[in-house]
Image (cartoon, rainbow, N blue to C red):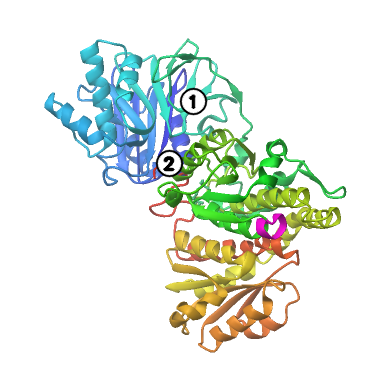
Amino acid sequence: MCGIVGYIGHREAYPVLIKGLQRLEYRGYDSAGIALYDGSEINLSKTKGKVADLKSKAEGEISVQGSLGIGHTRWATHGVPNDVNSHPHYSNSGDLVIIHNGIIENYESLKKALIKRGYTFHSDTDTEVLVNLIEEVQKTENVKLGKAVQIALNQVVGAYAIVVFNKKKPDELVVAKLGSPLAIGIGEEEFFIASDASPFIEFTSNAIYLDDEEMAIVRLGKEVKLRKIKDDAIIYPKVQELQMNIEEIEKGGYDHFMLKEIYEQPKAIKDTYRGRFLANEGIIKMAGMDDYLEKFTQAERIIVVACGTSWHAGLVGEYIFEDLARVPVEVEYASEFRYRNPIINEKDVVIAISQSGETADTLAAIKLAKEKGAFVFGICNVVGSSIARATHAGAYTHAGPEIGVASTKAFTTQITVLALLALKIGESKGNISKVELHQYLSELEAIPTKVEKALEANEHVKYIAGEYKDASNCLYLGRGFNFPVALEGALKLKEISYIHAEGYPAAEMKHGPIALIDEQMPVVVIATRKGHYEKVVSNIQEIKSRKGKIIAVVMEGDKQVKDIADHVLEIPETVECLTPLLTTIPLQLLSYHIAVMRDCNVDQPRNLAKSVTVE
Ligand code: F6R
């Protein structure tokens, strides 16, 4: 959580930092702040609210000149989101200024020790403790800023990506990373620092991604120097060429990133499977998996660890794996798994799913599984992310940057990778024949066109959204492969429209939730023809006789449900195990339109952040 950005070079830092913060706002938007060095002083402005609020405030409050500066957009951890707790933070002398993404867990004991030494604190944040600790080290040890940062960080327990500078030495930025991402963009006589490459993509395509426990001194006119924080070992930086392009991180004519990302799904799914199979020949080739195929075919169990939407994709994966690969699967919330004493061993394969590749709980679950000897396979979207690096092997979902906080194309591309894995294992174990594999792959190949077709229902979905935008509650029901889609549909609605929504397996309704049904209650039911269709039809009848309003997602040509439901949304026909890739589309659109009609901030829903780097 939190986005950090820094600049040192020859151009005006302010516009670079503001634009960079706007691109990083998906990481947190409780408050924002900026500190610029104008050649003699640091000018600092910060405020509760969004980067747009910061911009108005800063331009009226401070000189926004200078070619050295840092900026921050916050998702509050320690201290409520207010002006004082916003970053950047000064040290007591006013010489040092810092921005921080992460949590210093032992900040209270460090703070007490600093107070005893005469330090005063203005905010409730752990970050202000860190900047004063650095100052104290610099004073007592009489060392340069880089060394002071290193010594201070060795006293810290927690996670961080930090950028700090000293106004008395305005030719360098000191950066460090543990558990939160940090990239350094290398330009001509200029450097950019950011949580991801989006703030500097138009200035340079060369970047260094710091690994955990690394720090760097970024000095004008010098090469970037990297060191290990613990033992001071020198590391030779690997400069990577960035693949991202500017169009991918802009709205491209859409009102919101979420809508753009919903519409990008045909391409995202295609990009995810491109080059990974030959449908006609029934061949799947996945570079990240081929070398480890035996691990999967010999696995006694597959355990999926993930959070949120990625967990829902994992649940779809459970149904697909059990159906096609005939291997038992358990799907675990990473946050629960990491604090149990889970029974796992070398015969288990753990699949960690994460769009951002930075989710703290998923990372911790991976660490635990590795300690217990399991083989860990990652499914991530962000290339080079912490989870991608922490796993033994993996496959990327080539969805492109997902910026809307509500996950959409990540979900469908994760399912695409899971389906490919299940098919490959199923065929290798002899559970599915070459002919069947060919059929499944042909169906998968046709999915992008079918998603396009499902998207054509947009205007109809918008009309339905208008009918139910004022609902206070909503139920989502599905069975089999589409039970997780019901959960995901409910999550999408609640997180962006703030309408209370629950997903249930359709048959569970009788065991409690049916009590909620009356004429005020919209119920979204997924009723695909092959997925226990008759049973779902009975469930729909039960809702109808209690006057619930039914929005049904059905397959093209359906007649039976059409006669009973208040509204139907059709998706094209496909094999049952791939229907989640289609049934989820109208549900994404429904929550999107309802949220827009309720005047909610679709891309940045309250209290949320895209990348959850705290547990
Ligand atoms: C919901 C959503 C979250 C994420 C969850 C995991 O729309 O986006 O529930 O799915 O925070 O994030 P990743 O996939 O980045 O690990």
Residue 59 % position (x, y): 35, 35
Q: Residue at x 15, y 27 (%)?
A: 119
Residue 62 rendering spot, x and y as whole percentages:
30, 31
The structure residue drawn at horizontal position 45% and vertical position 65%, both measured from the top left corner, is 598
**Mark 2 = which residue?**
613
Apparent side of residue 171 relative to residue 511 in the rendered image (left or right): left
457 relative to 410, above or below? below
Q: Which mark is residue 210?
A: 1
Q: Which mark is residue 425?
A: none
Q: Is any part of residue 406 visible from this angle?
A: no
Residue 489: quadrant of the picture:
bottom right
Magenta span: 321-326
- The picture places residue 394, in percent across and down from the top left corner, at 63, 39
Indicate the amino acid at tag 1: Leu
Question: Is residue 235 depicted above or below 513 in this figure?
Answer: above
| Magenta region, main secondary structure | helix
User: Within the image, what quadrant is residue 375 found in?
Assistant: top right
Label located before the other in sequence (2 or 1): 1
25 or 479, nearer to the observer: 479
In the picture, the quarter occupied by the N terminus is top left
